[in-house]
């Protein structure tokens, strides 16, 4: 009769036996199957005597049969005792005699914890809000105009947003340092390509003017010879071109994707897109606030296996993202410990969400899933195709369903906590 002992808060050890006869039958069946195609000198495939097959393949067949038998016995035992296993078990076979009537083994494993939540009603949560204004739409159009600006020579001092061409020489203790000298070097002022102090020194200069100034490089500057040190620059301004913004007309509207050039439609689409992005970012902020409240009142141990699996997944995901940005990751191994804190938080939240969804029946209603898919699809040229694409694959549908489950949990939390509201500025919400 299998028995289960408690090793620690979540760790258990199953002690059980497997009838040898069950394994012998499996070994015989495997050897018979192998014998159909096995090639052994002096014998034709399918005509190899059992004893010869046993000599060549017996150990392999026994190990495979035992492995299957252990898995089957283990899962039957834990199902019978209604244990929710987290991760894979670690088997220890205690019987080494293949002639014994029973094979004794133990399996060490973890179980899912009981999720214990304190009173979320005692937590204070700040819910972010935002009202889109006409000024936000106008500022977005202004940004689009700047992105499509042309440039023309101007007869005035250089200012932000100008394109300038300069000669410069930088010296450290009177000696030109590496990378500290250039001729006819183009700079767009305000772009952040150069250090702020360097760009600031150009603002106000006129064509033909030369200026010298001292500047201290940041401690973390990539050029180690000058990092954290004061240098002297001499700059000569060769030319200045100012931006010429396009008019907001049919041609401009077409340049940003409005095929018929309708300026009114351009503004409507910008407003619609901004509202969609604002809504997405507000949801993200408020979800994080709600989840933080849940984490504060949750007290339970985490299965080590789940945390380690999540650490590994985050590590792989980060490596892939770094490769996509052009970084050479071949042969490099990111330290798993870098991801432990994030992994623990994600595992804990996953267990909390699953528990709340089950206890309070916060299921994803099909109409809410549909609404979320359709809203997401609106940002594409052919929304109907995007909707069909999501519904064609159960995995893609599941992703959206999980988002709806999260929204349901957020609503559940926000309905119970001490709630205050803060109205965000556009730049703060957009992370500018």
Image: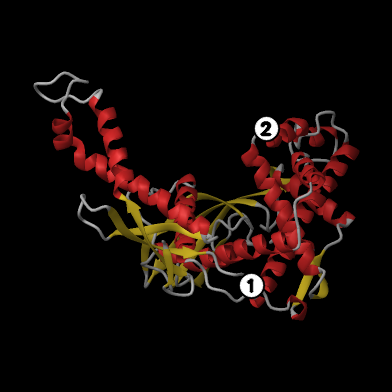
Relative horizontal placement of residue 5, taking residue 384 as reference (left or right): left
Relative horizontal placement of residue 119, taking residue 218 as reference (left or right): right
Image quarter hosting the C terminus: bottom right
Disc ID at residue 295? 1
Q: Is residue 229 above or below residue 180?
A: below
Comes first in the chain, label 1 or label 2: 1
Residue at far top of view: 44
| Residue 104 placement (x, y as % from top left) | 30, 59
What element does badge 1 sit on? Answer: helix
**125 and 82: which one is in front?**
82
Q: Residue at x 31, y 39 (%)?
A: 25
Q: Is residue 177 above or below residue 374?
A: below
| Residue 143 placement (x, y as % from top left) | 75, 50
Disc ID at residue 358? none
Image quarter hosting the N terminus: bottom left
Q: Quadrant of residue 178?
A: bottom left
Q: Distance between the Cα atoms at labels 1 and 2? A: 35 Å
Residue at far bottom of view: 122
Mark 2 sits on what residue?
392
**429 and 76: which one is in front?**
76
């Amino acid at each position: 009769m299998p028995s289960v002992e408690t090793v620690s808060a979540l760790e258990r050890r199953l002690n059980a036996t497997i009838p040898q006869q069950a394994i012998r039958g499996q070994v015989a069946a495997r050897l018979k199957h192998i014998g159909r195609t096995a090639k052994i000198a002096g014998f034709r495939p399918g005509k190899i005597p059992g004893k010869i097959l046993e000599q060549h393949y017996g150990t392999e067949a026994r190990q495979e049969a035992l492995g299957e038998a252990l898995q089957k016995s283990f899962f039957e035992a834990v199902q019978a005792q209604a244990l929710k296993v987290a991760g894979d078990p670690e088997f220890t076979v205690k019987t080494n005699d293949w002639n014994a009537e029973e094979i004794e083994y133990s399996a060490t494993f973890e179980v899912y914890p009981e999720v214990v939540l304190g009173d979320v009603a005692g937590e204070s949560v700040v819910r972010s809000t935002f009202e889109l204004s006409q000024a936000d739409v106008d500022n977005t159009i202004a940004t689009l105009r700047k992105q499509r600006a042309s440039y023309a020579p101007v007869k005035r001092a250089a200012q932000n947003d100008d394109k300038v061409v300069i000669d410069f020489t930088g010296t450290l203790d009177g000696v030109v340092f590496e990378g500290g000298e250039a001729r006819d070097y183009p700079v767009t002022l305000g772009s952040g390509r150069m250090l702020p102090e360097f760009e600031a020194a150009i603002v106000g200069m006129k064509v033909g003017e030369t200026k010298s100034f001292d500047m201290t490089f940041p401690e973390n500057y990539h050029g180690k010879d000058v990092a954290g040190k004061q240098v002297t620059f001499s700059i000569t301004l060769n030319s200045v071109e100012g931006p010429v913004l396009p008019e907001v007309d049919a041609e401009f509207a077409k340049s940003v994707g409005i095929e018929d050039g309708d300026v009114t439609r351009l503004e409507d689409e910008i407003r619609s897109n901004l509202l969609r992005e604002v809504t997405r970012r507000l949801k993200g902020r408020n979800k994080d606030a709600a989840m933080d409240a849940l984490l504060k009142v949750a007290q339970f141990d985490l299965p080590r296996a789940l945390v380690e699996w999540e650490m590994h997944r985050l590590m792989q995901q980060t490596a892939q993202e770094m490769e996509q940005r052009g970084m050479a990751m071949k042969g490099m191994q990111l330290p798993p410990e870098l991801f432990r804190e994030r992994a623990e938080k994600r595992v804990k939240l996953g267990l909390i969400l699953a528990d709340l969804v089950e206890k309070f029946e916060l299921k994803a209603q099909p109409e809410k899933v549909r609404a979320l898919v359709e809203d997401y699809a609106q940002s594409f040229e052919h929304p109907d195709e995007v909707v069909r694409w999501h519904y064609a694959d159960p995995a893609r549908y599941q992703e959206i369903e999980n988002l709806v489950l999260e929204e349901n949990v957020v609503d559940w939390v926000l309905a119970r906590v001490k709630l205050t509201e803060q109205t965000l500025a556009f730049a703060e919400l957009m992370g500018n």
